[in-house]
Image (cartoon, helix red, strand yellow):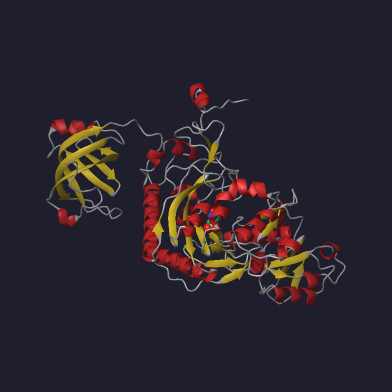
Amino acid sequence: MYRSHTCGELRASDINTDVTLSGWVHKSRDKGFVIWIDLRDRYGIIQLVFDEERTEAELLEKARSLGREFVIQVKGKVIERTSKNPNILTGDIEVLVQELVVLNQSLVPPFTLDDTTDGGDDLRMKYRYLDIRRRPVKNNLIFRSKVSMEVRKYLTNEGFIEVETPYLIKSTPEGARDFVVPSRMNEGQFYALPQSPQTFKQLLMVGGLDKYFQIVKCFRDEDLRADRQPEFTQIDCEMAFVEQEDILQVFEGLTRHLLMEINQKEVGPFPRLTYDDAMEKYGNDKPDIRFGMEFAELTNIAQHRDFAIFNSAEIVVGIAIPGGASYTRKEIDKLIDWIRRPQIGAKGMVYVKCNEDGSFKSSVDKFYNQEDLSTWAEKSSAKAGDLICILSGSIHETRSQLSALRMEMAERLGLRNPDHFAPLWVIDFPLLELDEESGNYHAMHHPFTSPKPGQLSLLETDPSAVRANAYDLVLNGNEIGGGSIRIHDKETQQIMFKHLGFTPEEAKAQFGFLLDAFQYGAPPHGGIAFGLDRLVAILGGQETIRDFIAFPKNNSGRDVMIDAPSLLDPEQLKELHLRIET
Ligand code: ASP
């Protein structure tokens, strides 16, 4: 038996107990006549003591030779500590060691394994197995497991069954590139790894399974913008005989269950915002509603003077920054520089200071009088002491620039409290979006999403006006889930494919199996998928998903620990009928 107890569980009530413990040498302090060793395992840290008076000389020497991260087993007695450590749960006691076995030695780790480490990201990733020994990383993985278990518990209680779907498949269109796998047995042919199990879960509904879920890996070969992973995990769900309302109820329930069980937070009914309203109020389809600073559209009221920049703009829109009237000229200039950075791309910013005495001071005083400015302040719910920041230009760009400013200011003002959870549904998304470059329409969600009832014919006349039975679940400024009610008949699906630019032959070649299935009594169905990595990070009060993934990839999609991707040897290439041309 390697251990009778773990390193985290012994307390004062265990004094005088004989114990066997196993773990890693976290730290050792050698005072000559006495040696203390912090022994660590997954459950905690316990102090071992060896001293001249009570320990045999040979054992004392052996203890002295232990290096950091050696794996050891000790037998000894729990005794009371003379100087207690209130910072650890085992801090009232220590173990007086009588026997010591070195189970394995260790090289000196390349970084310290404390809560805060001197190891940089690259080093930590290369030695991720050591990083995982650190308490914060270990705790994140335990936290993730707890969230997954709660998801399974809730969904299983609701009658969902977990079904696995294949990884070696054919392309599924979630808007990214596929990772592909060459087939040795089928020369020149490739599998694609699923961007999601979308078509399979729909086929499970045709198969009559009615309520499906799966905690599943998805693969998308995208340029890795900040905090994305090429493989990530979804809580993937689908239900048959449901309307949008049924789905929203079940998954609002799941989210509420998680917030309660994981964070002990009770949240009321989730607000619902249409996509159009979200864009108008927050310039963003995943608004953070933990704080106000809602957009005020000033277009009509600001275009009556001689200010050419506003007059030529498609939209003039502002937000009130609480307490911003006290910003100095220099601080405001800095803010303008910030918003003009290429990543944001605004050309400039108009501002109005709402002074405490009720007067206004703006950067456009030449064009607007106090009465004008007072109307703007009213429209943007600015109070005395606030700063109104106003941007103008084309609708889409201006809103997205102002949204970036809103988030930045909330961050600076400490309004994005990670312990405050503000979920909402965004509904009624456009069915299609125009790709400015190619001039083609793409499915905003995916090609299997149904249009709102009665809007199918609009596809011919005004495609961008068609709204979808699609919804996103947004939490604290992040899209944590998205789904839709699907098309479930062949004809509608074919019309959709046509509008997305597929010829009938292409549609048949790529999705013939689904179109076929729809001819055999496909029930009405719909579903949703949550991004588990992000959900866990948010519930854990952190922003980066990498911290909650055991073995993440870096920003270039590499696993630096196992050194993947890597070259294949010529034999293997030949077997796969592949030739590399450089
Ligand atoms: N397959 C979709 C996605 O990955 C989710 C869904 O529509 O259920 O975003």
Residue at x 22% of width, y 33% of height: 102
Residue 34: percent from the left, percent from the top? Answer: 20, 39
**Residue 200 in sight from this viewpoint:** yes
Q: Please, which residue is most extreme toward the right here? A: 306
Residue 428 at what x, y percent from top left?
A: 62, 67
Residue 387 horizontal side relative to residue 200, left or right:
right
Is 262 left, or right, of 196 in this rendering?
A: left
Q: Is residue 514 above or below residue 300?
A: above
Which of the image's four quarters has the C terminus? top right
Residue 222 vertical position relative to residue 152 in the rendered view, above or below: above
- In the image, ligand 1 is in what quadrant? bottom right
Residue 162: quarter of image: bottom left
Q: Position of residue 351 (x, y in %)?
A: 74, 65
* Viewport quadrant of the N terminus: top left
Q: Is residue 125 above or below residue 444?
A: above
Q: Would you place residue 541 above or below residue 292 in this image?
A: above
Residue at the top extreme of this rendering: 570
**Which residue is most to the front?**
520
Between 497 and 465, which is closer to the camera in this rendering? 497
| Number of marks | 0
Can you give x and y, in whole percent of width and height, for residue 66 in the image? 25, 33
> Does residue 290 appear in this view?
no
